[in-house]
Amino acid sequence: MKKNNQDTSLFNTDIAPNKDFGIDKIKTTNVNILLNRVRLDQKRTLKKRIIFSFILAALVSALAVYFII
């Protein structure tokens, strides 16, 4: 016989209040990480421009020397 006050399912708990964990958290972004990323991008861009200008200057001088000789 089954008792009237016996719970039929031990794992059937109300999980509806637990669903809103993600909504309660406020998403924040660290500003320092973003600023460091911008600085690194600026350094990369500067290095690319310097290398490109050096290669361009070397190419122009090599062509000038070739046509002079």
Image: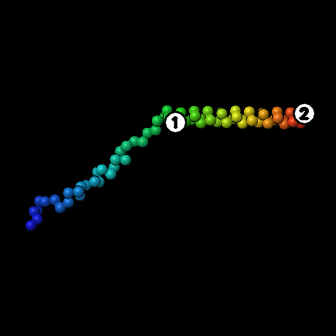
Image position, residue 14 (x, y; %): 25, 55
Residue at x-position 65% and y-position 33%: 46
Residue at x-position 61% and y-position 33%: 43
Image position, residue 24 (x, y; %): 35, 45
Colour approach in the figure = rainbow
- What secondary structure is marked by label 1? helix
- What secondary structure is marked by label 2? helix
Label 1 is placed on what type of residue? Answer: Leu
Quadrant in which the C terminus is drawn: top right
| Residue that mark 1 sits on | 34
Residue at the far bottom: name it: 1
| Residue that mark 2 sits on | 68
- Residue 54 shown left or right of residue 29 in the figure: right
Residue at the far front: name it: 69
Tag 2 or tag 1, which sits nearer the N-term?
Answer: 1
Label 2 is placed on what type of residue? Answer: Ile
Residue at x-position 9% and y-position 67%: 1
- Residue 68 shown left or right of residue 40 in the figure: right
